[in-house]
Image: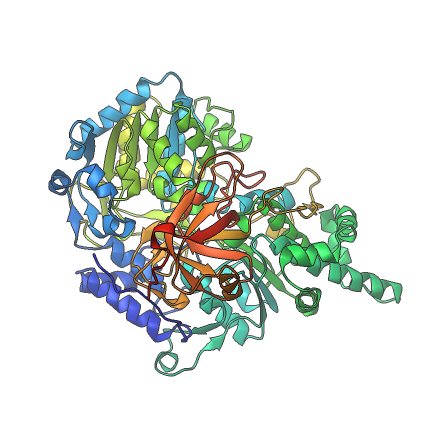
């Protein structure tokens, strides 16, 4: 497929006509326009299905409860294109591997179970029962249960995820690597250490009540566009929105609501950010420390003058522990250290602190721009510190809001997809199901890949996702997958992971979120949890493209039945009636009492949050201030001229590439581009459009390089670069992970760049 490539600055607001035009184009291109229009009208609605894209909450007020990228996700899934064994008979795995990720998924929906034939290098059809039997054969041949890895995508339902972890633990392993390990692990870990709960503390409607909203390290215009509605409403209500983001992003500047006709057809648009600061990559903790230092100076000055301080001392005394140790660390942090590491000036940080000081109700919200640096866990805790100073927990319009990625990644963790399960979870499962689950910690995603490279993994089962494209250090990740005895991918579409099969490999085609799920007891619904701890019922309405597809829940049950039989659980009965699964969830997990009855509530039900009620499950029983020092250097002794972050384009969700445009950044028909500050470009003697190689500066003797990336000048601080993943995942070392979480540091990659040698004189228009 050929695409017309261009670099053209985008001057319009986010949303508006551009969003409507793109949505219409994707609906028409699906070849199923009427079906998809009906789907979109039922998305994020009661008696409809939850968006298969991001985890932003539903306001249940709008006529149209979807955004541009949600529409892309639905139309991409509900296409009429399909592939079966005849497609694979014509295309070898080796040939398909040469194709782009966009090409692979554009071929359409997988429709029948497939088994890899290493002799012919083709996938061939296999019966469902035979596929389950093959999986059971490999699992039963393992030397011990920890030779199995059970990967989970964030889109898996609560019901499928719950049964998946019960199956794994009944088999004897806690190896549950999942997509959360690669994105928001620092959010959960940092919040648990600070407030005892690894989730956000606010409700969606708190945005309407906030006086100030601090947005750290996220690009909602592309990654969770419905958030722009909440930010726009907050701004209209008088809230000051203070953004810290390395790149200048259109969605954080101006937004035209596509549901307001006047804004679609005129230049009218709402301003999002009152203040917009562009810190260095990894510099957010220093920026927050600078705000805190300015605030502490003001607080002490007012106390010295006999006035009340600016902090909520009553809240601090009653609900927190460790503030004086943090104050001492602030005093020990020099302004020169803060400004150098953050890339922001002292006056800028004092201005941001002033907004926080004047606000009665503050929300801090963040995403992966915060969570994928070596010191990310401490950065999250620094955000919590700031909020504790003002008592911005447990009151309307204030709190903490990590914005999760995929639509049920938070629900997966709630359901027990966790390589570090709590004793309470394991005790509950043991009592209810009458078995002894394993107690030792399992593998996270990076640890699982390392185990594969050591030939310690006999079976990998992936419940959704695209591990080969999502994980870092792509050549080593692909080699790891090939070393497995058996790889099993439960998928809706063809992706990169299918093309690096283990010694034996299966692809199992599953239903999508939009599709009707009919089982023996009738039509089923599943549930998901959003970023605000709201659990929603989701019921697909479209007819599946093939009768040979099965739901994720039915596939998990089929595997478990083949491996474990029905001694502890009647797995096939659970596949027939999801209400039975929810009864087990209600009996074993807190917050799910009367689960089936609660699913009938329009808009879902709230799981609750102890920290939002000022109950802190920490060793002291109080919220804990963190007194972590700023890093001396973000990269130790590595002397790299640039720091690279990997990011999504606008026509992308995670590893799914919907198209080759990145409208808001002005990139069309291409993906191998490198965003750079214009002054850096000139200093390097390069010109706009030159092709360059990007090479990682690391200390393990492995060369990590990608070539032929087009230089694009962009509004980004000097010394910072950005490029799309998965194209730049080969640059992220497996050994470069967040302290305390194991998350790849995909937003902090030390690199150098040079002109592509073979194209040294070439200019690309």
Specify the quadrant of the image occupied by residue 651. bottom left
The residue lying toward the viewer, choosing from 711 and 547, is 711
Q: Say whether residue 428 is visible.
A: yes
Residue drawn at point x = 29 percent, y = 35 percent: 500
View extreme (front): residue? 761
Q: Check the picture and name the quadrant holding the N terminus.
A: bottom left
Residue 45's spot in the image, x, y percent?
A: 34, 60
Residue 337's spot in the image, x, y percent?
A: 71, 54
- Is 427 drawn above or below residue 666 in the view shown? above
Specify the quadrant of the image occupied by residue 585. top left
Q: How many numbered markers are drawn?
A: 0
- Is 96 drawn above or below residue 642 in the view shown? above
Residue drawn at point x = 17 percent, y = 60 percent: 31
The residue lying toward the viewer, choosing from 640 and 535, is 640
- Is 256 drawn above or below residue 672 in the view shown? below
Q: Check the picture and name the quadrant holding the C terminus.
A: bottom left
| Image side of residue 720 versus residue 450, left or right | right
Residue drawn at point x = 34 percent, y = 42 percent: 466
Q: Say whether residue 594 is visible.
A: no
Residue 727's spot in the image, x, y percent?
A: 37, 49
Specify the quadrant of the image occupied by residue 547. top left
- Is 52 drawn above or below residue 10 in the view shown? above
Residue 716's spot in the image, x, y percent?
A: 52, 63
The residue lying toward the viewer, choosing from 8 and 560, is 8
The structure's colour scheme is: rainbow
| Image side of residue 472 versus residue 307, left or right | left
């Amino acid at each position: 497929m050929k695409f017309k490539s261009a670099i053209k600055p985008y001057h319009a607001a986010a949303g508006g006509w551009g969003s409507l035009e793109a949505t219409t184009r994707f609906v028409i291109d699906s070849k199923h326009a009427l079906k998809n229009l009906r789907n979109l009208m039922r998305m994020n609605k009661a008696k409809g299905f939850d968006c298969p894209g991001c985890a932003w909450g539903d306001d249940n007020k709008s006529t149209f409860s979807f955004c541009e990228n949600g529409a892309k996700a639905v139309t991409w899934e509900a296409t009429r294109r399909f592939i079966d064994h005849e497609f694979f008979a014509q295309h070898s795995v080796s040939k398909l591997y040469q194709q782009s990720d966009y090409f692979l998924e554009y071929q359409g929906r997988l429709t029948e179970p497939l088994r890899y034939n290493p002799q012919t290098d083709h996938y061939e059809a296999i019966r469902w029962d035979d596929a389950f039997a093959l999986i059971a054969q490999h699992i039963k041949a393992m030397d011990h249960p920890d030779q199995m890895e059970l990967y989970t995508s964030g889109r898996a339902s609560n019901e499928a995820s719950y049964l998946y972890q019960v199956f794994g633990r009944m088999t004897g392993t806690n190896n549950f690597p999942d997509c959360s390990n690669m994105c928001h692990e620092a959010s959960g870990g940092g919040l648990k250490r600070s407030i005892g709960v690894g989730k956000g503390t606010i409700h969606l409607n708190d945005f309407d009540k906030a006086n100030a909203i601090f947005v750290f390290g996220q690009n909602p215009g592309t990654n969770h566009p419905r958030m722009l509605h909440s930010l726009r409403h907050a701004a209209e209500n008088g809230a000051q929105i203070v953004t810290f983001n390395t790149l200048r992003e259109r969605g954080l500047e101006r937004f035209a609501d596509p549901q307001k006709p006047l804004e679609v057809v005129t230049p009218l648009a709402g301003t999002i950010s009152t203040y917009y600061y562009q810190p260095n990559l990894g510099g957010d903790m220093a920026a927050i420390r600078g705000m805190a230092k300015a605030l502490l100076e003001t607080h002490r000055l007012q106390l010295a003058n006999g006035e009340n301080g600016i902090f909520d001392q009553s809240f601090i005394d009653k609900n927190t522990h460790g503030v004086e140790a943090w104050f001492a660390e602030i005093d020990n942090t020099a302004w020169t250290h803060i400004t150098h590491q953050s890339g922001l000036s002292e006056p800028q940080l004092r201005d941001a602190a002033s907004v926080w000081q004047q606000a009665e109700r503050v929300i801090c919200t963040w995403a992966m721009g915060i969570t994928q640096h070596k010191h990310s866990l401490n950065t999250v805790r620094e955000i919590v510190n700031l909020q504790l100073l003002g008592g911005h927990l447990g009151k309307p319009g204030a709190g903490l809001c990590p914005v999760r990625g995929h639509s049920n990644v938070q629900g997966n963790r709630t359901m027990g997809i966790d390589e570090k399960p709590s004793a309470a979870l394991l005790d509950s499962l043991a009592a209810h199901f009458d078995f002894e689950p394993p107690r030792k910690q399992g593998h996270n995603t990076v640890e699982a890949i390392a185990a594969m490279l050591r030939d310690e993994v006999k079976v990998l089962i992936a419940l959704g996702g695209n591990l080969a494209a999502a994980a870092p250090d792509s050549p080593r990740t692909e080699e790891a997958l090939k070393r497995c005895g058996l790889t099993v991918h439960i998928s809706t579409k063809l992706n990169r992971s299918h093309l690096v099969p283990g010694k034996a490999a299966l692809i199992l085609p599953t239903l999508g979120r939009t599709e009707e799920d009919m089982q023996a007891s009738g039509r089923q619904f599943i549930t998901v949890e959003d970023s605000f701890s709201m659990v929603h019922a989701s019921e697909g309405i479209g007819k599946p493209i093939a009768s040979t597809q099965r739901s994720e829940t039915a596939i998990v049950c089929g595997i478990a039945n083949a491996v474990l039989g029905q001694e502890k659980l009647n797995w096939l009965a659970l596949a027939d009636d999801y209400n039975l699964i929810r009864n087990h969830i209600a009996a074993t997990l807190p917050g799910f009492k009367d689960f089936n009855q609660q699913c009938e509530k329009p808009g879902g039900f709230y799981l609750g949050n102890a920290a939002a009620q000022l109950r802190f499950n920490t060793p002291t029983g109080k919220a804990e201030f963190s007194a972590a020092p700023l890093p001396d250097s973000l990269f130790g002794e590595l002397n790299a001229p640039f720091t690279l972050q990997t990011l999504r384009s606008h026509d992308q969700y995670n590893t799914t590439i919907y198209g080759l445009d990145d409208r808001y950044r002005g990139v069309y028909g291409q993906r191998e581009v490198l965003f750079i500050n214009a002054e850096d470009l000139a200093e390097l003697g390069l010109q706009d459009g030159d092709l360059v190689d990007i090479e990682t500066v690391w200390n393990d003797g492995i060369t990590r390089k990608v070539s032929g990336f087009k230089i694009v000048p962009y509004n980004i601080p000097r010394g910072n670069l950005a490029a799309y993943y998965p194209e730049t995942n080969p640059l992220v070392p497996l050994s470069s992970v967040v302290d305390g979480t194991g998350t790849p540091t995909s937003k902090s990659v030390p690199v150098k760049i040079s002109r592509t040698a073979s194209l040294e004189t070439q200019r690309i228009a």
